[in-house]
Image: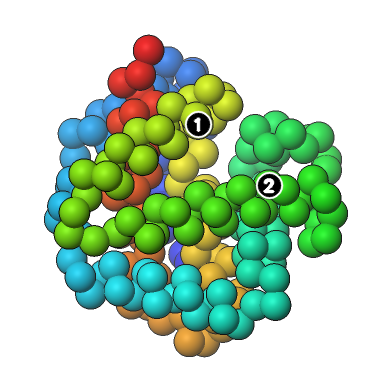
Amino acid sequence: LPSPGAFTPAFEGLRRLSPQQQHNLASTIYIDTFATMKEMNYNTISRVTETWETCRRRSANFEDEVGTLMLQKLFELQPKTRVVFGFDKDEEPVMGNKKTSVHAHTVVSMFDSVLQMLGPDTELLEDILKQVGKRHKDFGVSPSYFPYMGQAITHALQVKMGDSFTEGHQESWEEVYEELSSEILKSMLNSD
């Protein structure tokens, strides 16, 4: 499994900050220090897309299975995220449940769309991520939730792939997720 703090070093204690403090800190971290989309290398992108497609092939119902695992881990790591997905504070995502299925499919579809765009031409991907950022802002997603989703996605992939999900896969997913989420956060933080 991913280390508990794999996506959280810069976000330690972020949930205790006010929304404005979170906004300011996330702006500084994501906009000023993370590499641009253009700096991801081919091998990293290949490992990410390879693991995604391997999980798809190993799943009878990929969207429900991986999406539900992601939501379960996300809600475990940050219970406040339940509200964003329309779940009650004590409500758990359950495989086969209609509400869970809708959200699981939405999350996996978003990742599908974005992962298909990874490659040397990042201009269209950046435009898509800007739109994703605007939607996240409209839904009231806090910048502090992003590291938790990063942990949730790698958790779901590791569960589906087992021991074949290597440290190299983990590192590649961390790099790509940080790049993608930084672009989304830029949009969230810069949109009016």
Q: Amino acid at mark 2?
A: His
Q: CA distance from mark 2 to mark 1?
A: 14 Å
Q: Amino acid at mark 1?
A: His
Q: Position of residue 74 (x, y in %)?
A: 61, 50
Q: Residue furthest bottom?
A: 163
Is 23 on the left-hand or right-hand side of 137? left
Residue drawn at x 21%, y 44% as measured from the top left: 123
Q: Label 2 belongs to which residue?
A: 103
Residue drawn at x 42%, y 15% as measured from the top left: 20
Q: Label 1 belongs to which residue?
A: 136
Q: Secondary structure at mark 1?
A: helix
Q: Position of residue 8 (x, y in %)?
A: 42, 48
Quadrant location, the C terminus: top left
Q: Secondary structure at mark 2?
A: helix
Mark 2 Cα within 10 Å, few/some/many (few <14, many 20+)? Answer: some
Camera-side residue of 75 and 50? 50
> Can residue 41 be seen by looking at this rendering?
yes
